[in-house]
Amino acid sequence: MTQTDAEPDNGLAPVATNFIQTIISEDLAQGKNEGRVHTRFPPEPNGYLHIGHAKSICLNFGLALANQGITNLRFDDTNPSKEDVEYVDSIQEDVHWLGFDWQERRFYASDYFEKLYGYAVQLIKAGKAYVCDLSADEIRQYRGTLTEPGQESPYRMRSVEENLDLFSRMRAGEFSDGSRVLRAKIDMASPNLNMRDPVIYRILRSKHHRTGDTWCIYPMYDYAHPLSDAMESITHSICTLEFADHRPLYDWVLDNVDYGVKEHGRPQQIEFARLNLSYTVMSKRKLRELVEKGYVRGWDDPRMPTISGLRRRGYTPEAIRDFCERIGVAKRDSMVDIALLEHCIREDLNRRAARVMAVLRPLKVILDNYPEGQVEWLEAENNPEDPNAGSRKIPFTRELYIEQEDFMENPPKKFFRLTPGGEIRLKHAYIIKCESVVKDEKGNITELHCSYDPESKSGGATSGRKIKGTSHWVSAAHAVPAEVRLYDKLFMSENPDEEAEGLDYKANLNPDSLEVLKDCRVEPGLAEAKPGDKFQFLRQGYFCVDSDSSNAGPVFNRIVSLRDTWAKVQKHG
């Protein structure tokens, strides 16, 4: 491969050394595949991609980039009953958003339907495939168990001529769905159940998003996938660990079909451990159920582990790529703590997110000794972690809002916020003292009357006066009303798939995974914020402007809180 054939440098860091990279390095050293590295990402367009797919995307594209290779995007569209163009579009958007580009190499399994049919005819002519009339339940019964061999189908010894005739009539639509299948003739006594005459074609009348009603028979994944890899000249077919038992079938198909090995080369299947994330389900079937039955507000609900959900919540592609690199590539399944993913987004946003002030549960403060009608524009730094972030002006007036939790009438020990007769510093502003409390007829606190120390302005003559508590605030006259959505884990259990007796994974759904605050107040500058803009709300966490924002006011999603449990655990071992 020449340098011009390789992916362009897009600034993405290559993947770290792992056992797959070791295999590739050995292949390159031996001159295997003529020095080529050609991978593929093969999603099924039957749902939105999730964080587990992000690991596979980063691995496949990352390995190719690290070895001057190329990567295909190939849609495994062999089950039209569950597929949709919506999913095709969302997958392409997600891969691009993560920072990867397949260039002109976008393919579909459906591109090869005619060739795959011809290869199946090849197998029939060679006596290595037959049409079987057993039902799906009967096939399962005949297959046997891990300890007992299977039984041969009564249709296994049909002649080549009869099989060719029946398979042709299957394609022509002569038979009903499920009435017949084409099976590979391998070994019903094999210790590997996948080798016990697996089904390679089934009858399915369902409109395909690309081929329409042209076909009523469709190839199975275990048959279509190795041949698609081969026809695309893939060198390293990287898949998750559950396909390890399918590798003998992958190899059998390539060994028994004349697909043109001299022209295309021979792909090698390599398995790695899939991502299992705590407090999360990774099954597309379960995620689809959550969407279709209304447990969440769609595939891009910010509580979902889908890439579109993480994007809407405010996660960055840089943070996800960093997370995928940190968890590494293993040969054994394990559970990754979601706190690590949250740590990665905190680290990324700490460097890039502007600091602003937002009051989520407002309590009015009136500064009785501050001039009425006066507006003072104070200097506030945008991001102390970014020397180029600059500063902004924020308005200070007689009437302000602070957080309700920043005041207590009867505080416990070590409460360093505002109390009757107590003082706090307002961030970027003055020290204030609570003089009196106003309550409604029910005894609820409605406002505080305070005084301010005009000499205590940040950077002023007495600004060094030591006050233990500092609170964020906004000017009541200038603050922008906003809605804030506080997201928590979607599931209460660390492993939601561990089903309690008589219950399924949905019994672990967290009823408090979303809290909506309607009456929040944010700095006036946030009125111009656009969907996707990210900020650190001082003392509150990192937030992103949601796509639901409108002229009625911005809507903010909490991306993650400020508390970094992962860093704390790592620090203390």
Image: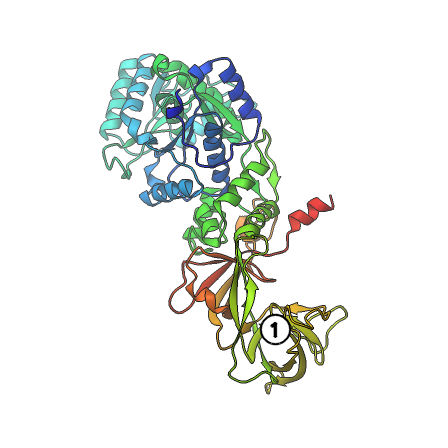
- Front in this rendered view, residue 76 or 568: 568
Residue 437 percent across, percent down from the top left: 65, 84
The reply to whether residue 331 is in sight is yes
Q: Which residue is mark 1?
A: 404
Residue 489 percent across, percent down from the top left: 56, 53
Tag 1, which secondary structure? helix
Residue 299 percent across, percent down from the top left: 42, 50
- Front in this rendered view, residue 34 or 489: 34
- Front in this rendered view, residue 5 or 430: 430
Residue 85 percent across, percent down from the top left: 31, 43
Determine which quarter of the picture holds residue 39: top left
Disc 1 residue crowd, few under 14, some 14–19, many 20+, Cα 10 Å: some
- The color scheme shown is rainbow
Residue that sits furthest to the bottom in the current view: 441
Quadrant into which the C terminus falls:
top right
Residue that sits furthest to the front in the current view: 461
The reply to whether residue 75 is in sight is no
Figure check: 243 above or below 360 = above
435 vs 482, left or right, is right
Figure check: 178 above or below 28 = below
Identity of the amino acid at label 1? Answer: Gln
Residue that sits furthest to the right in the current view: 413
214 vs 313, left or right, is left
Quadrant into which the N terminus falls:
top left
Residue at image location 56% in from the left, 41% down from the top: 323
The total of numbered circles placed on residues is 1
Figure check: 219 above or below 462 = above
